[in-house]
Image (cartoon, helix red, strand yellow):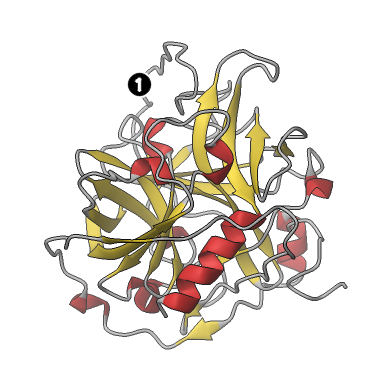
Amino acid sequence: MPGTPDSNRPPLSAAEIRTAPLQVPQHDAPDLNGFKPVEPPKSTVVPVKAPSAGEVAAPDLAPSMPTGQDGVRLEPNRFPVGEPPQLVFAGQELEPLLVFNPDGRRVYDDRTFPWVLACRVFSGSGNGSGALIGPRHVLTASHVIDWQALTVSVSLVQGSTPLASAGATHIMAYEHIVDVTYSNADDDYAVVMLDRRLGDGFGFLGCRTYDSDWDNETANWFNIAYEPLLHATAANFQTGFFLDEDDFDLGGGRMLITKTGDFLKGMSGSPVFGFWPEGPFVVGVASAGANGGVFGNYNAIAGGNNLTRLVNKARADFP
């Protein structure tokens, strides 16, 4: 039904947002000076069983932004940098290495909602990207988590300025993925629960289930991430790319394919989202890239009803 968060209408275009400003739910924010770097604690893995494909659709989860912000920018403020280095990929299967010409990513420095919500995620010896998806919740890719070390820390950095950091107390995922494959890329997401409520200070994205009616029909998708090859500290964003749900993926987790969105390894775990009248909602998580095969070259985005269910459970069990 039009006007409800659970409808299957596609995300808004820039022209539509300019005509009718977003009505994003708001909350009072605490003093941001309290979010200083900490030593990450040892995380507890929360067992969670993947729902069956036939279960009812999970409800949408609303975003929220701190009070006092005057509207939402359609694009973040750019961060002045030189030309990015030439990017070369080696052709390894299911590595997030595909950049389609022309490269649509731009480095930015913006401390407003939702652009400030991009997170750097560190786990064991690895790292990736993520985003605040709840008051104390960060959404990232399962394969970004070091499931042996079980230590996770996140940081919010804009430009060259660290804004906040936190450690993860609990981790929730359907699959503990080490190597991404075609069979598990559709469930390649995890929610980490933080020891600090960063979402209260900076806001957080909503989450909703991707609708296959949007396949190749709209390019009003956005991505915010970190990639050291573009800039050592600053985040980058892109928009104007298409998504297409894998027709052969029939489970609760669904792989979304993009041949126009640009991703590299450090961007694994970053959110793909669109804007609706109620604000920005995530529909997928950057997982992996593939070279060749039946679909040709593409980047895989993990989405589907399982994603929305996982975020629902994480927010409900760890408010």
Compared with residue 300, is residue 292 higher up or lower down, i.e. above or below? above
> To which quarter of the image does residue 194 belong?
bottom left
On the image, the x and y values in percent for residue 215 come to: 79, 41
Quadrant in which the C terminus is drawn:
bottom left
Q: In the figure, is residue 181 to the left or right of 54?
A: left
Instruction: Out of 234 and 39, give the one closest to the viewer.
Output: 39
Which residue is painted at 55% across and 54% down in the image?
Answer: 75
Q: In the figure, is residue 162 to the left or right of 71?
A: left
Residue 64 visible in the shown view: yes
How many C-alpha atoms fall within 10 Å of the one at disc 1: few (<14), some, or many (≥20)? few
Instruction: Out of 34 and 126, give the one closest to the viewer.
Output: 126
Residue 110 visible in the shown view: no
Q: In the figure, is residue 111 to the left or right of 61?
A: left
Q: Residue furthest bottom?
A: 28
At label 1, the amino acid type is Pro
Residue where numbered disc 1 is placed: 85
Compared with residue 253, is residue 72 higher up or lower down, i.e. above or below? below
Which residue is painted at 42% across and 88% down in the image?
Answer: 28
Instruction: Out of 236 and 316, give the one closest to the viewer.
Output: 316
On the image, the x and y values in percent for residue 313 come to: 51, 70
Which residue is painted at 47% across and 11% down in the image?
Answer: 91
